[in-house]
Amino acid sequence: MIEPPEGSFVTADPSTENFETPQQPPPNPDLKSLNRLVGTWTVSGEAQGTVTYEWVEGGFFLLQHVDLDGTKGLEVIGHEQKYGEAPSADIRSRYYGFSSGETLEYTDELSRDTLTIWSGERGSPAYYEGTFDDDDTLTGAWHCPGGGGYSTTSIALGISFQGCPERAARHPPRFNANAPASGSRSPGPSSHAAPATHR
């Protein structure tokens, strides 16, 4: 019998006992650092609104639903992987703005308690840097060349602990993903969007 090349798909009659499903690779382990973003956050400061983060099926991508200052959009965060190539070393993201159709690209890193988001490539002079005070408060600012940056504070309203048991163990029962916290401010993590407008 001739063996197919490694990584290729083989079709078979599912009614036979020899039907095999190719094993898929797991998501990159560094994506687990993003678990602390999962949930809905209010954003206050020089940008106002909410952002919600959720994992997609399979765990390869984190979605961010953005509603800031009347601007709505969706960001897809994960490792970029072009057809036939290995995944990118950095966590990358692309924002899709619903208001004017813009698409913006970012490089993301969450290391310990510091979230850094560069506009475009790592090391860009336009970047966000925020610090988690605890698992439910993120304070930071966008820094843009020549000014135009802004500061925000993000507070978790509801946290989804799906896939995050270590996070669930650290939170008291008041964090219910289906009920907003009373007296919460209007912030959300970095809210990926345009450096001077949405983010």
Image (spheres, rainbow, N blue to C red):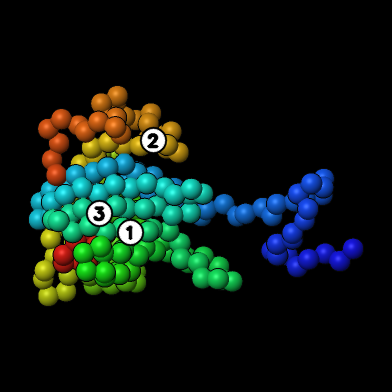
Q: Earlier in the sequence, mark 2 or mark 1?
A: 1
Position of 83 with respect to 69 (left or right) is right
Q: Are marks 2 and 1 in contact (CB under 8 Å)?
A: no
Q: Which residue is mark 1?
A: 75
Q: Which residue is mark 2?
A: 161
In percent of the image, x 46 and y 66: which residue is there?
80
Mark 3 residue element: strand
Q: Residue furthest right?
A: 1
**Is residue 133 visible in this depiction of the protein?**
no
Task: Calculate the distance from the C-alpha at mark 3 to the C-alpha at mark 1.
Answer: 8 Å
| Amino acid type, label 1 | Glu
Q: Which mark is residue 62?
A: none
Task: Calculate the distance from the C-alpha at mark 3 to the C-alpha at mark 2.
Answer: 20 Å
Mark nearest the camera among 3 and 2 is: 3
In percent of the image, x 29 and y 47: which residue is there?
52
Q: Position of residue 107 (x, y in %)?
A: 35, 65
Mark nearest the camera among 2 and 1 is: 1
The C terminus - image quarter: bottom left
Q: Which residue is mark 3?
A: 66
Residue 47, above or below 36: below
Dot 2: within a 10 Å radius of its alpha carbon, few (fewer than 14), some, or many (20 or more) residues?
Answer: some
Mark 2 residue element: loop
Q: Earlier in the sequence, mark 3 or mark 1?
A: 3
Determine the image quadrant of residue 120.
bottom left
Dot 3: within a 10 Å radius of its alpha carbon, few (fewer than 14), some, or many (20 or more) residues?
Answer: many
**Is residue 72 visible in this depiction of the protein?**
yes
The N terminus - image quarter: bottom right
Determine the image quadrant of residue 159.
top left
Q: Are marks 3 and 1 in contact (CB under 8 Å)?
A: yes
Q: Are marks 3 and 2 in contact (CB under 8 Å)?
A: no
Residue 142, above or below 124: above
| Amino acid type, label 2 | Phe
